[in-house]
Image: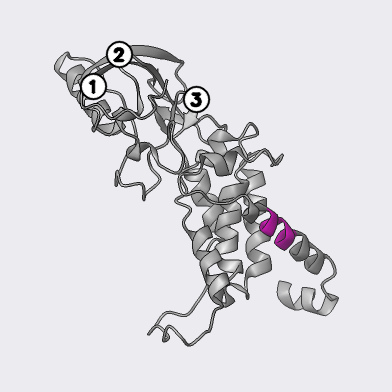
Amino acid sequence: MVAENHTTEKNINVTLRVWRQAGPSQPGKFVEYKASNCNPNMSFFEMLDVVNEELTHAGEEPIAFAHDCREGICGTCNLVIDGKPHGPHKGVATCQTYMRSFADGAVITVEPFRAKPFPVIKDLITDRSAFDKIQQAGGFISVRTGAPQDANAIPVAKDAADLAMDAAQCIGCGACVAACKNASAMLFVAAKVSQFSLLPQGQPERDQRVLAMVAKMDELGFGSCTNQYECSAACPKLISHDFIARMNRDYIAATFRQTFKPKSAAVAGGA
């Protein structure tokens, strides 16, 4: 339950229904906790810190949840709050969700991202190393080390640079996967592919990159995209689903070029 225009400074009381799971192979269940006298300006994580302090003082196991920067930058905070990845608001991460977003007396359900490639480690923490494996498959540019070139050495059109920066905003949190009924990682992969394909520095490995990253995504068990666009709606950085179409075009073109590559080039490439 989300409180609209909640501006009062009165402290609030909420009930948390938190997913508790001791380990990856252990069964899990929802457990209720009271969060009382919460300052509406507390972040959701600050509220969980208080709850955990109370649990620790009572001799109980605190709730395990992942966090790092708490500034919406690192993408570590992967909670589903009342059925929505990161919480009730658009364009923010879990750590940027505040208690003023909830009404006094609300019952708030908190659970981890649900996807087969993101197995639960403990409670609200999931293993999202699958994203790292996709990134390692091709989400980089191979360049020589040494002194950097001047910024204007390789001219880049402003519209291309702006679009590349839009894609590069992806923080790899996994909300797109959690929001998708197929657990598709297409928005994440599309963003990581597009941020390079739009720039001249990314052209030499363009085909290899998209083919390798899509293949790794499929290998790791992520689902297919059915164009429902829950991914872009849940994304805390508002990455556009238009990047998926851009990646699909790159993938088709790369597949065509690889299929009809001259035999001499194919032999030379495999030597």
Where residue 266 sits: x, y (%)?
Answer: 78, 73
Note whether 200 is above or below 174 in the view shown.
Answer: below
Magenta span includes 247: yes
Q: Mark 1 points at which residue?
A: 51
Instruction: Tell me if residue 271 can be seen.
Output: no
Is label 1 in contact with label 2 (beta carbons under 8 Å)? yes
Where residue 85 sits: x, y (%)?
Answer: 48, 33
The answer for how far apart the CA atoms under marks 3 and 1 are is: 21 Å
Which contiguous range is marked in magenta? 245-251
Secondary-structure class at tag 3: loop
Instruction: Say whether residue 58 is left or right of residue 25.
Output: left
Amino acid, disc 1: Val
Image quadrant holding the C terminus, namely bottom right
Is label 3 in contact with label 2 (beta carbons under 8 Å)? no
Upstream in the sequence, badge 3 or badge 2? 2
Amino acid, disc 2: Tyr
Q: Residue 78 — which label?
A: none
Q: Residue 33 — which label?
A: 2
Mark 2: give few (<14), some (14-19) or many (20+) Cα within 10 Å: some
